Image: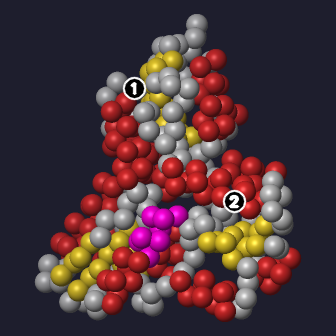
């Protein structure tokens, strides 16, 4: 997890905001290890990624500078010394198919995603209708669900209402969702099917919980929130939801030039946090721009 130059409070410039920096923000140790591993691989030869390694423009730019090619199709795997399975993972079936085809794979799947995949597999073996609480279009949700036929992704109560009754439901969740949202959807599932047994194995990352808790502490004293990361990425969206629960305006930015500094008032207290894939460089750049305002 990220410590911004050991500073948590940056006093205002002459006409700028007071910047309060969350005690936990950005990448956790597993994400950092994943970036370090693919960086080492890039030094050994031509590397491709079967998808986007991490959902962050800063990470993609760093990999591109190292010569790593993302979003490689299977037909082009032969061009690379190694093909990396992205941090969000792929389905177990897809991995087996590629291994049987003899493709040179390097599996850099997040340990938390692997845990969710294994947990869902165990629930499936027990005969449950398997569910992934996640987001339909996110690669991680599809990777967790992908190895189990019939698994449904639950993003909101509309998905819950469309489920067909099963005596037993078994659910896991996307690792970077808001813990509050996950808990709420599990509750809605149990209320919808009172006569079914619902088993939920919580696979939210502890780092996501810590990011949310750190932001909540700042929201007591801050007027607005700046989140560093890619708009739409699940951990950034979770932090946005945290701010909105407190009726605090929030914005997600990947770079300083995406900030509209004219919106920030002198002496306004601004909370700075970052999504689970934001790079240190991006966080420092945004913090620096706010501090110079």
Q: Nearer the viewer, residue 62 or 249?
A: 62
Q: Is residue 212 above or below residue 98?
A: above
Q: How many callouts does the rendering have?
A: 2
Magenta range is 110-117
Q: Dot 2 corresponds to which residue?
A: 38
Q: Position of residue 264 (x, y in %)?
A: 55, 23
- Most frequent secondary structure within the magenta stretch: helix
Residue 222, disc: 1
Q: Are marks 1 and 2 in contact (CB under 8 Å)?
A: no
Specify how the rendered protein is coloured. secondary structure
Residue at (42% x, 50% y) in the render: 207
Q: Is residue 149 left or right of residue 163?
A: right
Q: Is residue 79 magenta?
A: no
Q: Residues within 10 Å of mark 2 (few under 14, many from 20)?
A: many
- Does residue 159 lie above or below 228 as drawn? below
Task: Tell me: residue 106, above or below residue 94.
Answer: above
Residue sitting farthest toward the top: 14
Q: Is residue 155 something that shows in the picture?
A: no
């Amino acid at each position: 997890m990220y410590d911004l130059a050991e500073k948590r409070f940056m006093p205002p410039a002459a006409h700028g905001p007071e910047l309060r920096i969350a005690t936990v923000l950005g990448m956790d140790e597993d994400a950092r290890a994943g970036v370090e591993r693919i960086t080492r691989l890039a030094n050994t030869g031509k590397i491709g990624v079967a998808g986007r390694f991490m959902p962050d423009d800063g990470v993609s730019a760093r990999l591109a500078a190292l010569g790593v090619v993302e979003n490689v199709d299977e037909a082009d795997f032969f061009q690379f010394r190694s093909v990396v399975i992205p941090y969000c993972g792929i389905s177990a079936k897809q991995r087996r198919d590629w291994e049987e085809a003899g493709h040179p794979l390097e599996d850099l799947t997040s340990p938390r995603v692997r845990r969710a995949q294994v947990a869902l597999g165990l629930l499936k073996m027990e005969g449950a209708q398997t569910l992934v609480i996640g987001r339909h279009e996110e690669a991680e949700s599809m990777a967790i669900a992908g190895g189990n036929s019939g698994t449904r992704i639950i993003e909101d109560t509309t998905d819950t209402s469309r489920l067909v009754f099963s005596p037993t439901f078994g659910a896991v969740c996307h690792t970077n969702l808001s813990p509050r949202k996950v808990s709420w959807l599990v509750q809605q599932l149990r209320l919808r099917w009172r006569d079914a047994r619902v088993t939920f194995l919580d696979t939210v990352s502890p780092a996501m919980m810590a990011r949310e808790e750190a932001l909540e502490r700042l929201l007591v004293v801050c007027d607005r929130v700046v989140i560093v990361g890619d708009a739409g990425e699940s951990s950034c969206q979770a932090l946005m939801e945290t701010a909105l629960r407190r009726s605090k305006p929030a914005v997600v930015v990947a770079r300083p030039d995406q900030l509209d500094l004219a919106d920030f008032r002198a002496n306004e207290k601004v909370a700075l946090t970052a999504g689970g894939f934001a790079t240190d460089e991006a966080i420092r750049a945004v913090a620096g721009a706010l501090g110079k305002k």
